[in-house]
Amino acid sequence: MEVVIAPGDELARLAAEAIETLLTGRPQAVLGLATGSSPLKVYDELARRHKDGLSFARARAFMLDEYVGLPDDHPERYRNVIEKEIASRVDFAPGAVRGPDGNAADLARACADYEEAIAAAGGVDLQLLGIGTDGHIAFNEPGSSLASRTRIKTLTRQTRQDNARFFGGSVDDVPRHCLTQGLATIMSARHLVLLATGRAKAEAVHQLVEGPVSAMWPATIMQLHPHATILVDAAAASRLQLADYYRETYAAKPEWQTL
């Protein structure tokens, strides 16, 4: 696991650079797209690089999760959020970006179909991630099975409170259920890139990087991944006991070594 502590704009540049490097070498790569506030600057940077010539025309992408029961035209439906924040700003081919169907008549079948679609695409090459204040990644809430696959989940009160800002501040308007890639699904991606900023994420980042692997802090499963990159600002890194070491390690990194 590599931990990089830097200002938010630099973190976004590093994540976008990793994606550009991937697409330059493998234009047909499969990306994993996250919602929430963490990847927004990354998407802005990717849109800028697209204007400078970076193409997504042969790439495919899979979303991490989706609310259950939101109308198709709801602005906070994650498919619409991804369309607004990144898909419509670059040149993905029609149908190249997929997400789980939170309005399917058979949700269990929709989850199984989504797993099959990811496998049929050859798996995700680079997965962007954020982290919740309680340590969840995607919508894998505390207590989630470390071997879980795409499934329906009930959102915790904390997650719904954290997301209420996207629903006019009303917790009651945040859906109670979602479809989410499982922890094992996420761990199947070849490169995990997690971004976290702000002091509110400090304890979750501390547990992720330095705590024991536990279903109580689902993101800790990333400690077992062979290629995981954690990009955090100083506030999010404020609880890290080895913060100085992570800074020294990154400063001494060979020029030829990418994320």
Image (cartoon, grey):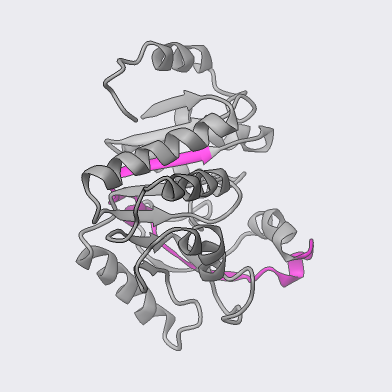
Q: Is residue 61 left or right of residue 210?
A: left
Q: Is residue 238 left or right of residue 219?
A: right
- What residue is shown at x 24% (from left), y 56% (from top)? 28
Q: Residue 89 at x, y = what percent?
A: 49, 59
Q: Is residue 2 above or below residue 117?
A: above
Tell me which corner region of the image, top left, top right, bottom left or bottom right, holds residue 203: top right
Q: Residue 16 at x, y = what percent?
A: 43, 41
- What residue is shown at x 45% (from left), y 77% (from top)? 101
Q: Residue 18 at x, y = what percent?
A: 36, 38
Q: Is residue 165 left or right of residue 92?
A: right
Q: Nearer the viewer, residue 157 or 69?
A: 69
In the image, which residues are magenta?
168-195
Q: How many marks?
A: 0
| One can see residue 115 in this view | yes
Q: Nearer the viewer, residue 151 or 129?
A: 129
- What residue is shown at x 68% (from left), y 68% (from top)? 174
Q: Residue 259 at x, y = what percent?
A: 34, 30
| One can see residue 190 in this view | no
Residue found farthest to the right: 169
Membership of 97 in magenta stretch:
no
Q: Is residue 170 above or below residue 229?
A: below
Question: Which image quarter is the N terminus in?
Answer: top left
Tell me which corner region of the image, top left, top right, bottom left or bottom right, holds residue 150: bottom left
Q: Nearer the viewer, residue 52 or 27?
A: 52
- What residue is shown at x 22% (from left), y 48% (from top)? 26
Residue found farthest to the front: 52
Q: Is residue 203 above or below residue 6?
A: below
Membership of 182 in magenta stretch:
yes
Tell me which corner region of the image, top left, top right, bottom left or bottom right, holds residue 151: bottom left
